[in-house]
Image (cartoon, rainbow, N blue to C red):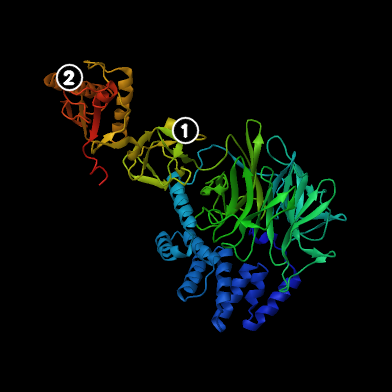
Amino acid sequence: MDPIKKTIPLFLAFLLGAVFAFAQEGYSKGDGHFFQYDYQSAVTAYETDLLKQGLTDRQWFNLAESYFKTKRYEKAAEAYINLHKKGAVMEPHHLNKMMQCLSKTSDKERKNAFLATLSTNFDKELLENMDFNNNLLENSSGKTTLDFEVFNLEGNSAQADFAPAFYNKKLLFSSGRIQQKKGRATSQEGFLNIYDANLKPNGQVGTAQPFAKIPASKFHKATPYFSQGLNSVLFVMSNTEDGELAFDSKGKNALAIGMQTLDGSFRLLLKDLSTSFYYPFYDEASGKLYFAANFDDGYGGTDLYFVYTNNGQIMSAPINLGPRINSPGNEIAPFIFEDSFYFASDIFYGLGGMDIYKSNIEDESFSIPINLGEGINSQEDDFGLIMRNEGDGLLGYFASNRLGGKGKDDLYGFKVDEKPGLKTLIVKGKTIKPYKSSETISKAAIRLLKPDGTLLSETYSDEEGNYRLEIPWENEVVIESSKERYSLFRKKLSEEELNALENNGYDIEIALYDDLVEEKEGQKVVKMDDFFFEKGQTTLTPQIQQELDKVAFFVEQFPSVQLRIETYTDSRGGSSTNFRLTQSRSDAIKQYLLKKGVSPTNIIYSIGYGEEKILNNCTNGVFCLEVLHKKNQRSLVVVLNDNVLFD
C-alpha cells in the first residue's frame, strides 16, 4: 500500500467533485478508478479508451502511474518517455517516476542517457546526493556492516500497519485492521485508526487495542508521535467542522495535525483544507515540529517542513528543509535520534520504492542523506523508522510492504549494537594557520584521495574556515589542502586514524607565504627576529637556534624554496678576519638547518660577506655607538626563487 496515499481519506464527496471537474475534458472510467486507487481497473479502462478515442496528457500520466503501481515498470517507462518526447509538461515528481521505472527495469544506459538530458531540471544538491549514494551502494553492495536481524511483529494484521511510535513501554502505530463492534467483526479497510500494544523484552508486541487516550471518532486518525516533554500525542486527522468532514472549494478533504495531551485537552496545530499534513515529529531539544506536507511550492510530491513552537504552540510559518533533504519524489516520516535525521524518500536512486535515509544534523544544516542499505531497506517500500537506546544497544521499528509480510504494510523491529546504515567516512574541522591557530583560512581547497592519487571528494573551507567531507568508507586516504600563496598540506591517514576521527574534528594547518617572509635590503628573506653571535664566536646560542627554527619551518611548509645564507659583521677588526668569521657563521647556520631536516638542495649558497655591506656610516675609523655597530652584525636567509615560486 502506498505510504503517501494510505493516509488520504477516500470520501465520496471528493470523488464526485473530481468526476465533475474532469467531465469537461473527456472524462474516462479510468479517471474514476485512478482516483479511487484501483490502479488495475484504471489500466484496463485507459487501455480501452486508448483504442477508441485516445487519451489526454493528464490521462496518459494517470495511466503511467497506474502501470507503475501495478509493477508494470516497462510500460510505465515507455508512457513517461513518450510524454517527455512529445513535450508534455512534466512535473518533478513525473521525472522522478520515469527515472524510478528505468531503475526498476535495469536499463542503466538508458537511465544515464536521460539523466544527462534532465540534469538541468534537478537541483545540484539532488545530483550530489545521487552521485554519493550511487557510489556508496555500489561500493558496499547495499549492505550494512552491522550484523542484526529484522523481525516481523506478531501483532501485524492482514491490513495496513505502519507509522510506529514509542509510548513509554508501549508502541503506538496506525492501522486499517478489522475491529470488533457489537460482537461482530467489521472490516475497516480504508479507515485508519491509532492503536497501542505493550512492548515485550524481545522487541515483540502484545495484543493491539485502539489507543484510548485519543477520543474515538468516525474519521481518520493516523501517524502518531508521543512527546514526553509535551505529555502529548501528535497525530494526523481528517479535517472536520461541526463533527462533519470539511472540504475546500474543489471538494478536497485534506489531513490536519492535532495534539492530544494526556490530561484530556486537545489542540489543533496545523490545518489547511487544501493541504494534507503527515507524520508529525516534535524535537524536544529545539522545540521544532517537523512534518510532511504537499504544499504547491515544494520540490516534488510531499516535502519535509518544520515550524518553530513554544510548548507546542505554533510560532512560525512552515519552513521547507530545502533541496538537500527534499527531492522531486516524496519525503515523509521525519525522526531525529542522536543528531541524526531519519526520513523516507522514494527518490529514484534508492534500492526500492521508498527507502529510509539518514542525514547528520550539523548546526542548522544537513549532510548528504545516506541510504541505510539492505536490511532496513528492501526493493519495496520502507518508511517510518524510529529508534531508542535499550539496554546495551538500540531498539528500532519501521514499516515495510516487503515480501513475506502479513498484510499490505507490516511493522518490523530490530535490535542492534549501534546505529544501522552503510558506513561512511566523515572528515571535518577547520583550516588554520599553524603559527596562529585563532586565525582561520577561508576558501582553501580540501581534497580526499586514494593512496594512488584518485580523487574521492573535494570541497572548500567556508568563511569561518570550516570544512566537511563525507565519502563511502575507505580504509586509507590521503588528505590534501591548498590555496594560492599558501603551503600544501598532505597527510596519509591509516584505518586506525580514520576510526579515531569518527567523533573528532581534524584541523588542517597551512601557512601563508607572505606571513613568513619580508623585504630586507632589496631582497626577499625569511622573517626572523634579529640575533647576534658572541664577539668573535661562531657558536649558535639557544636564542639563535630559536630563530633558525623559523627557517626550518618555512622550508617544511614550502619545500621547493631555494635559499642563500648571508652573514655580515661590522667594520671593527681586520677585513680578512671578518670574512673568515662570517663564512664560518654562515656554515654553522647551514649545518644546523641540515640537522633540523632541511635538504641540502634547499640551501644553494652559504656565504660570509664580512664587512662588505655596511648599512650606516660606521665604516673603518669612524666612532659609533655599540647599538649602531650592531645594525651591521646580521644574518639573512634569502629566498632566491621568490619571483617564480608560485608561477
Indicate which label's residue lies in the foreground, 2 or 1: 2
The front one of 555 and 301 is 555
- Residue 436 shown left or right of residue 321 in the figure: left
Amino acid residing under circle 1: Asn
Q: Residue at x 66, y 45 (%)?
A: 286
Give me the C-alpha separation between circle 2 and circle 1. Answer: 55 Å
Q: Residue furthest left?
A: 576
**Vertical relation: 177 (above or below) 207:** below
Residue 4 placement (x, y as % from top left):
64, 59
Which residue type does callout 2 highlight? Leu
Q: Is residue 72 visible?
A: no
In the picture, the disc for residue 581 is 2
Q: Element at badge 2?
A: helix
Residue 499 disc label: 1
Question: From this viewpoint, is residue 273 visible?
Answer: yes
> Which residue is pictured at 53% across the width and 53% down the height?
324
Dot 1 alpha-carbon crowd within 10 angstroms: few under 14, some 14 to 19, many 20 or more? some
Question: Does residue 321 appear left or right of residue 480 in this picture?
Answer: right
Circle 1 sits in a helix, a strand or a loop, which is it?
Answer: helix
For disc 2, the neighbor class at 10 Å (few under 14, some 14 to 19, many from 20) is many
